[in-house]
Image (cartoon, grey):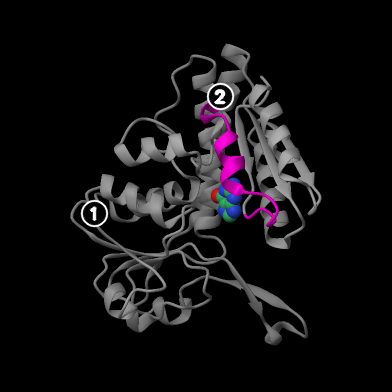
Amino acid sequence: MTATIIDGKAFAENLRGRISSHVARLKAEHGVTPGLAVVIVGSDPGSQVYVASKARLTVEVGMHSEKYELPEATSEAEVLALVARLNADPAIHGILVQLPLPPQIDSNAIIALISSDKDVDCFTPASVGKLTIGLPGPVSCTPLGCLMLLRETLGDLSGLEAVIVGRSNLVGKPMAQLLLRENCTVTVAHSRTRNLAEVVRRADIVIAAVGRPNLIRGDWIKPGATVIDVGINRVPAPERGEGKTRLVGDVDFASAVTVAGAITPVPGGVGPMTIACLLANTVTTASLIHGLVPPRDLTA
Ligand code: GUN
């Protein structure tokens, strides 16, 4: 068997097209241009690439984009002051502080200051609380992107066994909340889980989000399962030449593709969905800030 490849890139392109239409309508009918501010501290190459594509795609869908690139040695007080300024800026409807932050900065203190009206990442304690108890509010971008791909692939997820490998605040925990909402039976596995391969083998849906290149192999996967690979790991690729690298996921794609029913590639799977969902969340916060009904059809 060879799995269906889930084309996150194409799905995200389509979503961005629909976002562009909403942005055009917000501008023409209400004089509102959604604005997204992205803050990055330091020079982590992965984060730099990610932030550059966020800024480019924000502009491409017609939104206002601001990018703040601060040096590695920036103090916590300076980042707090920037977030406070962005909270008060009427041109900005979404604030994203790229994680991880350098060690001198307490991420929790920064996140706690982001206005929950502008929390497009769904990182603040208020947003996480709403997501957990099922109140309306933002939904974390990467888990939302994964969910959209799952719904597109499987339709109704009710009753399915989902195993999430990784318990981060960014992906694993919010993903568990979203899949519970979909009536899945959810297991969150992590580095201390015993018999990880056996646990993963139970899953109709595998979400891999641990940051360990090629950890999950084909023989861990139940035949026909849907595999969503959130990992983006840069590994040496001597076959491409000396010093060259390539991106791989947390799933060993070559073996998994022969067993799974459907699988996301890396790159071109979840990554583009994360950014598209960030833009969709910014349309939602801009609408709500201006007292307008947010579009329902973007991420439904
Ligand atoms: N670092 C890696 N992924 C993300 C994300 O989705 N949002 C933020 N703020 N930082 C990240």
Q: Position of residue 174 (x, y in %)?
A: 40, 49
Q: Residue at x 65, y 38 (%)?
A: 58
Q: Between 83 and 242, which is closer to the camera in this rendering?
A: 83
Indicate the quadrant containing the C terminus: top left, top right, bottom left or bottom right. Answer: top left
**Which of the marked residues, 1 or 2, is nearer the chain's N terminus?**
1
- Residue bearing mark 2: 286
Element at label 2: helix
- Residue bearing mark 1: 184
Queried whether the magenta region covers residue 21, the answer comes back as: no
Q: From where the camera sits, is residue 222 visible?
A: no
Q: Position of residue 151 (x, y in %)?
A: 33, 50
Queried whether the magenta region covers residue 101, the answer comes back as: yes
Would you say the beta carbon of the disc 2 residue lies within 8 angstroms of ligand 1?
no
Indicate the quadrant containing the N terminus: top left, top right, bottom left or bottom right. Answer: bottom left
Residue 260's place in the image compared with 255, above or below, is above
The residue at the far left in this view is 159
CA–CA distance in space, label 1 to label 2: 32 Å
Callout 1, which amino acid?
A: Cys
* Circle 2 residues within 10 Å: few <14, some 14–19, many ≥20: many
**Image side of residue 199 versus residue 231, left or right:** left
Q: Residue at x 49, y 78 (%)?
A: 214
**Image side of residue 206 versus residue 264, left or right:** left
Q: From where the camera sits, is residue 187 visible?
A: yes
Q: Residue at x 31, y 73 (%)?
A: 200
Callout 2, which amino acid?
A: Ala
**Image side of residue 145 versus residue 55, left or right:** left
Residue 70's place in the image compared with 257, above or below, is above
**Which disc, if any, is residue 231?**
none
Magenta span of residues: 100-117
Element at label 1: loop
